[in-house]
Image (cartoon, rainbow, N blue to C red):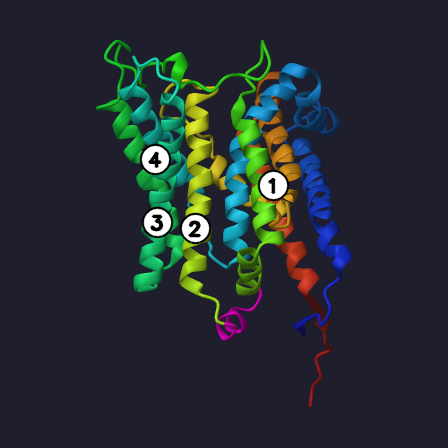
Amino acid sequence: MIRIQARTEPSTLMKVASPLIAIVCTLIFGCILFSALNKNPLDALHVLLIAPLSDMYNVGEMLVKMGPLLLCAVGLSLCYRANMWNIGAEGQLLAGALGGSVVALTFIDSESVLVLPCTLLAGIVSGMLWSAIPTYLKLKFNSNLILTTIMFNYIGLYLLIWAVNGPLRDPDGYGFPESALFSDTTTLPTLFEGSRIHLGILFAILCAFVGWFILAKTHLGFQIRVFGADEPAARYAGFNSKKLSWFVMLFSGALAGLAGVSEVTGPIGQLVPNVSPGYGYSAIIVAYLGRLHPLGAIVAAIFLAVLYMGGDLAQIEMGIPVAVVGMFQGVLLFFLLACDFFIGNRLIFNKLTTH
């Protein structure tokens, strides 16, 4: 007979080491998977994890993918630390891309230096508004936040698809579902000539430090940590749960919205249906891999961005299905959750006795 017993003092070392253990277990799973696909496991892992960092251009592309992952993950880290289970970063990212695109296209002929800041602000506000709806439903009617945020992901996606096939479609685009190209005044400048690295990566790193400062150095961050660790104690201490919930959800929506508008004003340069390959969902893994720490999310975002890049290279060079990357992400999250379970609990094996 097997029973579960909570550990009185979970190991601090294992809390830090669990992401590394999960990554190693994922790599072992990958070797088995590639062998089943009749691919050399070492060659496949090299293409998946090493080749994306082989030259400066690939490193730049990795940083382009890292930006939205990190922005979404920082916001989600604060939500999860407060026990607000926001699964809607993908929809908030798409809302930010759509809201920012409306402003960019409205002032497409403007030469004002204020157009780009207004475009970015529109994306941030759109992400906040998209996160505010499920937050209101949660606090007012006690709806399930996980379900509502997931549903709003799909609503955001189909709203964006409707927009690029309808009012925002480029009239000179030969019927393709995409907007007109944004003007130079509404495009984020690149940091290095010949690369696509843009200001969005600096926004992401700055926001990671802002998130860390809020959590570690402010009274608000202390309230968030206490509220997530022991809600009854937080209420007894007089912490306002509604204000904390509103703050973390709007903060998360703002960062996801910034990620979306940075994509359309950065590497893409227009609104298209496939703004995101699933950054908002992958950011959940980034947040957990970074141990729900905004600075830890930087390292985790680099790893997931490498996986994205490696998946594209593996598809081109080895014919490995791109869905393998999604499987890697899912297996990684599974091992992370398994590690967290065994950090907090142990299995007790009791012999069955007969009377």
Q: Kindly report the distance in space between the C-alpha atoms of the residues bearing marks 2 and 1.
A: 18 Å
Q: Kindly report the distance in space between the C-alpha atoms of the residues bearing marks 3 and 4.
A: 17 Å
Label 1 sits on what residue type?
Answer: Phe
Residue ID at (26%, 9%): 172
Left or right, 218 with reference to 347: left
Q: Residue 296: where, in percent of width, then height?
A: 65, 43
Location of mark 2 (residue) = 249
Label 1 CA crowd tier, 10 Å (few <14, some 14–19, many 20+): some
First reached walking from the N terminus: tag 3 or tag 4: 3
- Label 2 with label 3: CB-CB less than 8 Å: yes
Label 4 CA crowd tier, 10 Å (few <14, some 14–19, many 20+): many
First reached walking from the N terminus: tag 1 or tag 3: 3
Q: What stretch is highlighted in magenta?
A: 229-237
Residue ID at (72%, 40%): 28
Label 2 CA crowd tier, 10 Å (few <14, some 14–19, many 20+): many
Q: Kindly report the distance in space between the C-alpha atoms of the residues bearing marks 1 and 4.
A: 30 Å
First reached walking from the N terminus: tag 2 or tag 1: 1
Q: Residue 79: where, in percent of width, then height?
A: 50, 52
Q: Kindly report the distance in space between the C-alpha atoms of the residues bearing marks 2 and 3.
A: 7 Å
Location of mark 1 (residue) = 209
SS class, disc 3: helix
- Which quarter of the rendering shows the C terminus? bottom right
Residue farthest toward the right in the current orientation of the protein: 13
Circle on res. 157:
4
Label 4 sits on what residue type?
Answer: Leu
Location of mark 3 (residue) = 132
Left or right, 132 with reference to 29: left
* Visible residue check, residue 318: no
Q: Kindly report the distance in space between the C-alpha atoms of the residues bearing marks 1 and 3.
A: 24 Å
